[in-house]
Image: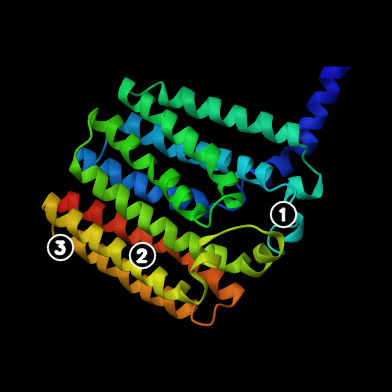
């Protein structure tokens, strides 16, 4: 009887688990996926090993989901006071704290089992990724720079993917890492601008609050540094024109995002955040085409 009740409970809760893991909103998964693919293609100098590609595509989904679960657990007492997050499953009580922690553990275990199919170097690197993903949500209480911690966490897939493909790290991987870190801080600040007024009321810290009226300028600086770092990466790796066309298109999209956030309206800031998916995609498209030609 208890097993039947548990199965019924799981079936009943599954839509809420989907929402908790943000599987209904894949933007975060895509933003994590693009730099991972950049890294794999640079590491392989073209198409990576198929098993490594599949492992990291699945791992991106699992780790992004795990990050969302632990983030909502950390914010469970705050999300109900924020317009954008007030209907999240933990905030509404549709999922319990215990269920969220069990789901987080299951997702981490599944991701770790995937990493075990790579090499020892990548397995050791994965421990850093778990630590960053777990710590990030709690940084909002202690520092105005949680977006930097998120950037470090999102960018950690870069050395992991590179190591899984080559079993080594070189100077190229750290340029990809830096570009990903800078880019993540820029777009997550746009995201934080959506919640800034609510966060000020409930005491949550963010770069959007720290930067204040200089937010657009600093985002523009971060975006410029992202483009310059990617340009340096292409030069150092000896890439051809398709790569640089991709980076240039990303720069154009960054200019468009600056237009969107000009008046700091919530909806427009969120639209700018979403637009970063296309920036990551055009960069990858440039890498993909470049390695096909050269």
| Element assignment for label 1 | helix
Q: Nearer the viewer, residue 267 or 150?
A: 150
- First in sequence, mark 3 or 2: give its number: 2
| Label 1 CA crowd tier, 10 Å (few <14, some 14–19, many 20+) | many
Q: From this viewpoint, which residue is outermost toward the bottom?
A: 263
Q: Who's the residue at 25% across and 51% down the image? A: 288
Please determine whether, in this image, residue 112 is positioned above or below residue 266. Answer: above
| Label 2 CA crowd tier, 10 Å (few <14, some 14–19, many 20+) | many
Q: Which quadrant, please, contains the N terminus?
A: top right
In the rendered image, which residue does mark 3 sit on? 241
Q: Nearer the viewer, residue 143 or 6?
A: 143
Q: Position of residue 136 (x, y in %)?
A: 53, 44
How far apart are the alpha carbons under marks 1 and 2?
A: 28 Å
Horizontally, residue 96 falls left or right of residue 283, namely right
Q: Position of residue 108 (x, y in %)?
A: 54, 29
In the rendered image, which residue does mark 2 sit on? 222
Q: Who's the residue at 41% across and 30% down the image? A: 126
| Element assignment for label 2 | helix
Q: Position of residue 201 (x, y in %)?
A: 71, 65
Please determine whether, in this image, residue 26 is positioned above or below residue 219. Answer: above
Horizontally, residue 155 falls left or right of residue 97, namely left
Q: Position of residue 145 (x, y in %)?
A: 49, 55
In the rendered image, which residue does mark 1 sit on? 79
């Amino acid at each position: 009887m208890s097993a039947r009740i548990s199965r019924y409970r799981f079936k009943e809760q599954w839509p809420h688990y989907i929402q908790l893991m943000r599987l209904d909103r894949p933007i975060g998964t895509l933003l994590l996926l693009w730099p991972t693919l950049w890294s794999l293609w640079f590491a392989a100098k073209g198409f990576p090993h198929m098993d490594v590609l599949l492992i990291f595509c699945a791992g991106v989904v699992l780790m992004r989901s795990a990050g969302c679960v632990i983030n909502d657990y950390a914010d469970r007492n705050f999300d109900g006071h924020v317009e954008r997050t007030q209907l999240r499953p933990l905030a509404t009580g549709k999922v319990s704290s215990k269920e969220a922690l069990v789901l987080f553990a299951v997702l981490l275990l599944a991701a770790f089992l995937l990493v075990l199919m790579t090499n020892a170097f990548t397995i050791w690197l994965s421990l850093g990724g778990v630590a960053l993903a777990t710590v990030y949500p709690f940084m909002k209480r202690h520092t105005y720079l949680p977006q930097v911690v998120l950037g470090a966490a999102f960018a950690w897939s870069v050395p992991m993917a590179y190591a899984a493909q080559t079993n080594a790290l070189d100077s190229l991987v750290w340029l990809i890492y830096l570009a990903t870190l800078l880019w993540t801080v820029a777009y997550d600040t746009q995201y934080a601008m959506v919640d800034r007024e609510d966060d000020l009321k409930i005491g949550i810290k963010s770069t959007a609050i720290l930067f204040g009226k200089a937010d657009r300028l600093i985002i523009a600086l971060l975006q410029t540094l992202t483009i310059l770092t990617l340009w340096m990466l292409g030069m150092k790796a000896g890439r051809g024109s398709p790569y640089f066309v991709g980076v240039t298109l990303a720069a154009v999209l960054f200019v468009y995002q600056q237009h969107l956030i000009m008046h700091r309206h919530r909806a427009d800031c969120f639209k700018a955040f979403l637009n970063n998916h296309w920036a990551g995609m055009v960069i990858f498209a440039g890498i993909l085409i470049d390695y096909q030609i050269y």
